[in-house]
Image (cartoon, helix red, strand yellow):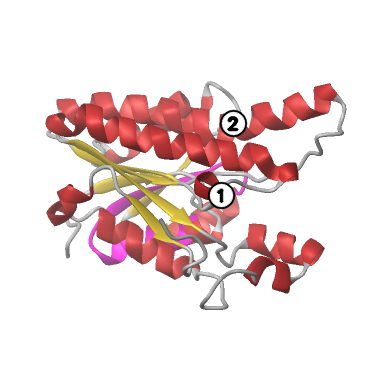
């Protein structure tokens, strides 16, 4: 059990990727705090599958007070945390021709949920980890944050690019304190978000440019996340792991 003794908070845990991450972490021996925003039933159903090694904690990460509420609840449940997965995210679309008020609202919410909530949770995690012998963060970025994105979803790409920079900054600034950070940058993953895109644009559009001609499975993301938390993988600090089927190579 590579992750025995670890307790890890996973945000956005009721989505397909979040659930896969929680299951993979528990399979490797960790305990998990399952964050949810509104879907309490899904969170409780997930915890029931985790062999008594999970807790549900609600929080609205679109609210600036949400990260502190979540962190406090996670500590109350787990007692101590050794890891954080900033996985919660949304993808909205807004045209550059939209009214300015609508444009600003979409960008503000996207940055709040995808990036600023992770910023606040990372601050809390850094303070907690360095006071308790160290810890690790895995931030769910995206291929979109590396190569740019479509005009209507620039906010999503920008938020993920910022998350990558946050990961690197934590790695450079706090690695000497035993606080390490890794980012994952998936391309399309077979999730509700992907299905919504396919419903609007077609599967061919989603698969265009992916040499292996398929999306990643959420289980793949879960397995890589669990691997990144292994104590033996401290040298991954600051890495951005591409999981995109060869559609973007650096």
User: Magenta residues, as a range?
Assistant: 18-39
User: Which dot marks residue 243?
Assistant: none
Q: CA distance from mark 2 to mark 1?
A: 14 Å
Marker disc for residue 111 = 2
User: Which element type, helix, strand or loop, lies under badge 2?
Assistant: helix
> Residue 183 vs residue 117: left or right?
left
Residue 201 to residue 70: above or below: below
Residue 138 at x, y = what percent? 35, 46
Q: Secondary structure at mark 1?
A: helix
What is the number of callouts on the image?
A: 2
Mark drawn on residue 144 = 1
Residue 190 located left or right of residue 51? right
The residue at the point 45 percent across, 37 percent down is 163
Closest to the observer, 14 or 185? 185
| Mark 1 neighbour density, 10 Å: few (under 14) some (14–19) many (20 or more) | many
> Mark 2, residues whose alpha carbon is within 10 Å: few (<14), some, or many (≥20)?
many
Question: Where is residue 28 shown, x and y percent of the image?
Answer: 25, 64
> Which residue: 65% across, 62% down?
194
Which sits earlier in the primary sequence, circle 2 or circle 1? 2
């Amino acid at each position: 059990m590579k992750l025995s003794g670890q307790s890890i908070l996973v945000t956005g845990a009721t989505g397909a990727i979040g659930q896969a991450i929680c299951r993979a972490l528990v399979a490797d021996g960790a305990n998990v705090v399952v964050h949810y925003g509104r879907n309490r039933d899904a969170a409780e159903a997930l915890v029931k599958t985790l062999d008594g090694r999970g807790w549900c904690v609600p929080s609205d990460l679109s609210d600036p007070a949400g990260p502190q509420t979540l962190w406090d609840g996670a500590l109350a449940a787990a007692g101590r945390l050794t890891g954080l997965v900033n996985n919660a995210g949304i993808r909205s679309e807004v045209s550059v021709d939209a009214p300015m008020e609508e444009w600003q609202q979409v960008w503000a919410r996207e940055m709040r949920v995808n990036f600023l909530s992770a910023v606040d949770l990372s601050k809390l995690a850094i303070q907690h980890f360095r006071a308790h012998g160290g810890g690790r963060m895995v931030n769910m970025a995206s291929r979109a944050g590396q190569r740019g994105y479509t005009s209507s979803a620039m906010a999503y790409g920008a938020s993920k690019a910022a998350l990558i920079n946050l990961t690197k900054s934590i790695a450079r600034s706090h690695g000497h304190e035993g606080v390490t950070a890794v980012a994952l940058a998936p391309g399309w993953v077979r999730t509700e978000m992907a299905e919504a895109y396919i419903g609007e644009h077609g599967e061919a559009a989603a698969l265009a440019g992916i040499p292996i001609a398929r999306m990643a499975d959420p289980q793949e993301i879960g397995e890589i996340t669990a691997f990144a938390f292994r104590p033996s993988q401290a040298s991954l600090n600051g890495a951005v792991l591409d999981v995109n089927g060869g559609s973007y190579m650096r």
